[in-house]
Image (spheres, rainbow, N blue to C red):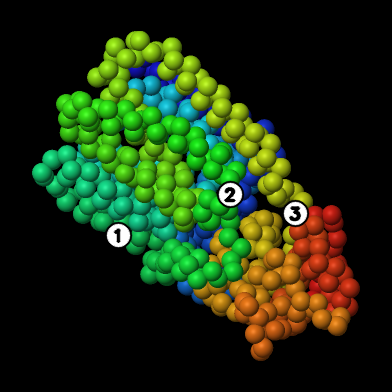
């Protein structure tokens, strides 16, 4: 390829990203509405503004800290668009294009053959990773900076390590442990190849983590919020605390995920492991460079660690699992092509045919989810806009709006910053604020309130015990201090019918998608 081939690669990724971003008017992930609105607040109030009263029952309100601070600063230019929904889509388009291109560059720097093919296959490989390539969230930046940490460790570029790890933590503080884990596994892999070990890369990464953590207003408060999102969430899962977690914070739990997400990885990685075992048996592995040996061992080890995290902790780890699986498979294919050229010549057609079948299978699988299933399942922000704007026009400044689901918050917040809400981003922030309130809201969110002699109750403990039962009205009016209730009739039919039939609530706005009740 000539020296300008990168331009065509970049154009291809831009066309691909644009086609997926703009074919649907929906924003696939509601978190983007929160992120761009928070960026708009920084633009209006200043970069050191750290108050956040819009979530009244969250540790974020009390700690006054932003763990996505760097990401929100990056989004500020998007807030100059008159149509912020277009700003979200345009930002996601730029982010997808940039990360795909950087992934291609990293693969090329690592010496993989056909890096464009691997980057393109990665985009289509499985629905989970493809979905996160279509949303405006910090996880894509975390992904590519995590891979950069791996590359800089192999290259012994300590300045690059410090910069990449600082950038990752500045963008997404709660995932600040990822650079340390990657560099540690890579150094251990290097130690397995040679008798020498250099701890300077680890020190560079730790320094970068420290720089990225403190480079924000109220970094101590941000560290506490990150602790809640990591440690408190793990403890809550272990103790089976009722939390309405998003699917990516839950482990792989059904057969569909295995067949659509894990099976393709198995088909990719298993042959690579067999080829590696053959190379080790025939003592060919020892003949490649120590850096390539380290890269292969480390990529396989890192992918297995994030694979276990995906299966047993949270599907969010799948991006790095797939990314390092691709690096491992690509490096092994490089080994195969350089040390077994006769095998490639003899079986080239079979290899190409197998690759085409794999690509078509993955392409069909991913296109079904990304073009049909995910758009169908994603909430349409336009359905909630009238209710949010009615609240903005008819309520008082600072009135609290009760909403059963934490994922109602981003869209309501996007259209209406005049009111305050209960909780957002993650339900663990409400649990850390007040475990009893979290349980009370949980029963609203699963639409399983207690109906007894015409009165409706929720509970402050699970299972309910005497002294923790409270009427739904008292919980909304007194515990959550709400002036209004936002409810989705189709999502919460029992709760909606209760509100309709209780004279202490007045329906002031109604639509098929959402209703607003005043608390009397």
Badge 3, how many Cα within 10 Å: few under 14, some, many 20+? some
**Residue at point 87%, 70% (across, down):** 500
Residue 347 in view: yes
The part of the image, by quadrant, that contains residue 365 is: top right
Residue 394 in view: no
How many numbered marks, from 0 up? Answer: 3
Which residue matches tag 2? 254
Disc 2 to disc 1, C-alpha distance = 39 Å
- Nearer to us: label 2 or label 3: 2
**Which one is nearer the viewer's eye here, 282 or 289?**
282
Mark 2 or 1 closer to N-term? Answer: 1
Which residue matches tag 1? 210
Residue 87 horizontal/vertical position (percent): 60, 43
Q: Is residue 249 above or below residue 321?
A: below
Helix, strand or loop at disc 3?
A: helix
**Residue at point 85%, 56% (across, down):** 511
Which residue matches tag 3? 385
Q: Are marks 2 and 1 in contact (CB under 8 Å)?
A: no
Helix, strand or loop at disc 2?
A: loop
């Amino acid at each position: 390829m000539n020296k300008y081939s990168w331009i065509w690669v970049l154009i291809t990724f831009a066309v691909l990203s644009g086609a997926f971003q703009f074919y649907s008017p929906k924003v696939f992930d509601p978190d983007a509405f929160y992120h761009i609105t928070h960026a708009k607040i920084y633009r209006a109030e200043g970069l050191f503004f750290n108050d956040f009263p819009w979530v009244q029952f969250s540790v974020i309100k009390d700690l006054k800290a932003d763990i996505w601070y760097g990401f929100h600063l990056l989004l500020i230019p998007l807030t100059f668009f008159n149509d912020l929904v277009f700003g979200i889509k345009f930002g996601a388009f730029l982010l997808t294009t940039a990360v795909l291109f950087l992934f291609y560059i990293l693969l090329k720097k690592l010496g993989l053959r056909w890096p464009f093919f691997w980057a393109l296959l990665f985009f289509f490989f499985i629905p989970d990773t493809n979905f996160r390539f279509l949303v405006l969230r910090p996880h894509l930046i975390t992904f590519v900076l995590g891979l950069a940490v791996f590359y800089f460790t192999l290259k012994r570029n300590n300045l690059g390590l410090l910069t990449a790890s600082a950038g990752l933590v500045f963008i997404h503080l709660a995932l600040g442990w990822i650079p340390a884990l990657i560099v540690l596994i890579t150094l251990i892999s290097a130690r397995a190849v040679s008798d020498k070990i250099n701890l300077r890369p680890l020190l560079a990464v730790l320094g970068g983590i420290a720089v990225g953590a403190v480079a924000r207003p109220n970094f101590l408060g941000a560290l506490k919020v990150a602790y809640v999102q990591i440690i408190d969430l793990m403890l809550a899962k272990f103790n089976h605390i009722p939390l309405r977690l998003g699917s990516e914070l839950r482990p792989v739990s059904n057969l569909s995920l295995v067949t659509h997400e894990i099976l393709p990885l198995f088909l990719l990685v298993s042959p690579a492991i067999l080829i590696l075992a053959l190379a080790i048996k025939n003592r060919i592995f020892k003949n490649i460079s120590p850096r390539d040996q380290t890269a292969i061992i480390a990529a396989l080890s890192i992918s297995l660690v994030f694979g276990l995290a995906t299966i047993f902790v949270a599907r969010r780890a799948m991006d790095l699992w797939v990314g390092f699986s691709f690096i491992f498979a690509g490096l092994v294919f490089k080994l195969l092509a350089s040390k077994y050229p006769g095998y490639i010549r003899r079986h080239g057609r079979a290899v190409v045919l197998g690759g085409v079948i794999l690509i078509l299978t993955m392409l069909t699988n991913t296109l079904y989810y990304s073009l049909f299933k995910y758009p169908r399942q994603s909430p349409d922000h336009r359905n909630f806009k009238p209710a949010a704007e009615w609240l903005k026009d008819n309520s008082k400044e600072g009135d609290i709006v009760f909403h059963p689901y934490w994922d109602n918050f981003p869209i309501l917040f996007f259209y209406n910053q005049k009111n305050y809400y209960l909780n957002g981003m993650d339900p663990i922030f409400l649990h850390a604020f007040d475990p009893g309130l979290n349980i009370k809201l949980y029963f609203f969110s699963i639409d399983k309130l207690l109906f007894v002699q015409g009165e409706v109750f929720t509970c402050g403990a699970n299972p309910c015990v005497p002294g923790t039962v409270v009427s739904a009205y008292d919980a909304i009016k007194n515990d959550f201090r709400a002036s209004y209730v936002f409810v989705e009739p189709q999502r919460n039919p029992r709760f909606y019918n209760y509100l309709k039939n209780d004279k202490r609530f007045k329906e002031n706005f109604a639509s098929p998608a959402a209703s607003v009740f005043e608390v009397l």
